[in-house]
Image (cartoon, grey):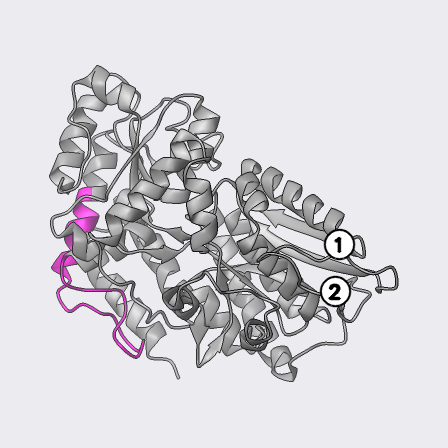
Amino acid sequence: MTKFKKIATLMMAALLTFAMAACGGASSESGGNTGSGGNAGSGGSAGEAASPGGDEKPITLRVAWWGGQSRHDATLKVIEMYEEQNPHVKIQPEFSSYDGYWEKMAAQAAGKNLPDVMNQNFGEYLTQYTEKGLLADLTPFIESGLIDTTNISQSILDSGTLNGKIVGLSLGTNAYMAMYDPALFEKAGAEKPKLGWTWSDVEDAARKLKTVAEYGVDTLETHRVVEIWLREHGGRYFNDDGTGLGYTDDKILEDYFTMHQKWVKEGLAPKLDVKAQHDSTENSMIVLGKLGLTFTWSNGIGAHAKAAQRPLDIAPMPGPNETKGMYLKPSMFFSIPESSENKEEAAKFISFFVNNVEANKILNADRGVPVSSVVADALKSTVDESTAKTFDYIKLLTENSSPIDGNHPATAAEVLKVLTETDEKVLYEQLTPQEAAKEFRKKAEEILSRK
């Protein structure tokens, strides 16, 4: 069983376990929290915590997120800043890799022991946790001013809204991208990626890059890339009500499988067992110089360039019809679980996190372009050269992308797990691309048709 399968299986089992438990709403178990919420004022500029009085009750907040080491280090520094400004608050950080994070959160949800502030992801995870009643509505905290959204657009607030409730506040704007090593492209004599390039151009570049590196292009993160691929070909993952797939012609997915299999079979991209050995930013194949082109989220450029200690560049996803395929995405949310006994203090921390300029200078837009226009304007001239490329990329996509699909059902994670498994079978030549496209439709629609 692959690592992905194991994690997904554990996650789904845990979600089924806490489905019944979640119906009761807030839990009396606080997971180490000792207070019932502070009463510190929110005076000063947006996101600046007021100096607390000496009679405030000590509070412990558990804050959980995912990411690489550079994100962990920066977030811990911001937590120290918040604790200095709010001496009555002690923050207990909980962080892990992306896959490990969801496994951990599913287990905590099953035990009614979610943290006070947790990262959430747009799509199936936000839907799952919301439908189970595990996330608090942030609207009262926004209306009271505990979470200051003065400089945050309505569209960003809407991205975290489900069933009429704001269940998450986006921490940044993100987009999928091509990330490449310009030095390797020059050495190989390959044309650098740019708006309007195609998947055929990717293959051409990969062949040239393979003459100067171990591989040309990275193995694709199929469940990410296929979303863009489907949109480019007039489809999408799911239909309007999430009860079926959002495309009718299986040839679309068959063509994707054919392309991906060809790259791996011909050695343009690494095999899955090789790819699995490079599962962190610091150990990624582009950082190590083993290939010249990969595809990932735009907020990752800073950490990758820092780890590589050399310039890396950004380009839009290939097409054709790339403007239909590409979209702007909330990079991640902060949510407050219903089980938290410290919701007010959790809300104050979230407001600080998204609005405090000095804190965001430390965070360095690692979670995407900041959602506060004031913070984004202040950071544009102070971030490092690599991170500044993210700002330019998001600006480019603002005029060269299409709205994000917001119709991911709660079972989307299970469907995408099947897609990944099916792609693995193609890469191992256990299924032909045509067989795989049909098998995926059959299994996916069985899952989506459940009541």
Residue 246 is covered by the magenta coloring: yes
> Which amino acid, by three-letter code, is at mark 2?
Ala
The residue nearer to you, when weighing 253 against 190, is 190
| Above or below, comparing residue 351 to residue 142 in the picture | above
| The quadrant where residue 158 appears | bottom left
Q: Position of residue 342 (x, y in %)?
A: 72, 68
Q: Visible in this render: residue 6?
A: yes
- Left or right of 201? Residue 404 is right
Residue at left offset 17%, top offset 46%: 258
Q: Which residue is mark 2?
A: 40
Which residues, given as a range, are shown in magenta? 233-259
> Which amino acid, by three-letter code, is at mark 1?
Asn
The earlier-in-sequence mark between 1 and 2 is: 2
- Under circle 1, the secondary element is loop
Q: Residues within 10 Å of mark 2 (few under 14, many from 20)?
A: some
Q: Are marks 1 and 2 in contact (CB under 8 Å)?
A: yes
The residue nearer to you, when weighing 178 against 275, is 178
Q: Position of residue 314 (x, y in %)?
A: 29, 36
Q: Position of residue 204 (x, y in %)?
A: 13, 30
**Rendered image: mark on residue 86:** 1
